[in-house]
Amino acid sequence: MYIIIMGGGRVGLALAKLLIDNGEDITLIESNEALSGELASELDALVICGNGTNSKLLEESNIEDADYFIATTGNDEANLLSCILVRKYDVPNIIARVSNPDHEEAFKEVGIDHVISPETAAAAQLQKLVTRPNAAELMTLGEGDAEILDMTITNDKIVGKRYKDISPSKEYIIIATYQNGKLIIPQPDNIISRGEKVTALVKRGSFKKLAKKLAE
């Protein structure tokens, strides 16, 4: 994939490194001349010094060929303007960072559907660490309607029972377990062991029921 990132600060740099490590073709646009020079020497990517809100510069970055345009600067106005400009080039995927969560609606009103707020995301992650200390979230499905979580069985009340005795329910279904480090699809008559790690698909609002069943 060809991905253009606007902004070479901490977020843009970290993202660029991850995508480069994944083998993606990256162009990074940074307006600060000194920083763009540092980035050019550090990254295995094309680094363009300039303003991503300039149509000419976007065209020089081959915006028409981009699969993704990602605006990661700390300036919401610049991110919004660049995304509006990029829309006319029919880039399939446009993603914007928003520093002020109050600005998120403005991005969506102009058709930028993928808006990421690090502040909101950090708050949500902290909330989950407090309320779900025994679970690792792997994925959110739909519009937050369900989650896939890893949990460890510590409830002695279900140890020795069969999986069909506890799953599926209307709120969750256990979709995988692990034996000797290998993923296993649990069968109805498989016996549940203490300390066994499982992966579950959980409906929104049902985490407490699952946690009570597995880890009470």
Image (cartoon, rainbow, N blue to C red):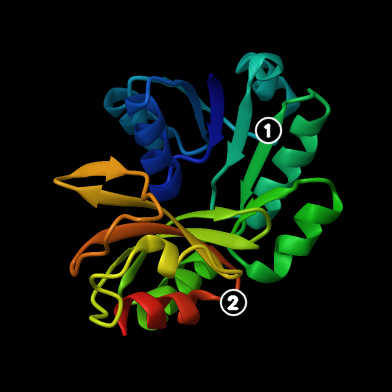
Most foreground residue, 108 or 190: 190
Q: How many marks?
A: 2
- Disc 2: CA contacts within 10 A as few (<14), some (14-19) or many (>=20): few
- The reply to whether dot 2 and dot 1 touch (C-beta < 8 Å) is no
Tell me how far mark 2 sits from mark 1, CA to CA: 30 Å
In the rendered image, which residue does mark 1 sit on? Answer: 93
> Measured along the vertical axis of the image, is residue 29 above or below residue 82?
above
The quadrant the C terminus occupies is bottom left
Quadrant in the rendering for residue 86: top right
Quadrant in the rendering for residue 137: bottom left
Amino acid on which the number 2 mark rests in the picture: Gly
> Which one is closest to the eye, mark 2 or mark 1?
2
- Residue situated furthest left in the rendering: 180
Give the percent coordinates (x, y) of residue 189.
35, 56
At 65% from the left and 63% from the top, the residue drawn is 145
Q: Is residue 145 visible?
A: yes
Amino acid on which the number 1 mark rests in the picture: Asn
In the rendered image, which residue does mark 2 sit on? Answer: 205
Q: SS at mark 1? A: strand
Give the percent coordinates (x, y) of residue 133.
32, 77
Most foreground residue, 175 or 138: 175
Give the percent coordinates (x, y) of residue 135.
35, 69
> Measured along the vertical axis of the image, is residue 103 above or below residue 67?
below
At 30% from the left and 70% from the top, the residue drawn is 161
In the picture, measured across the screen, residue 149 lies left or right of residue 102, that is left
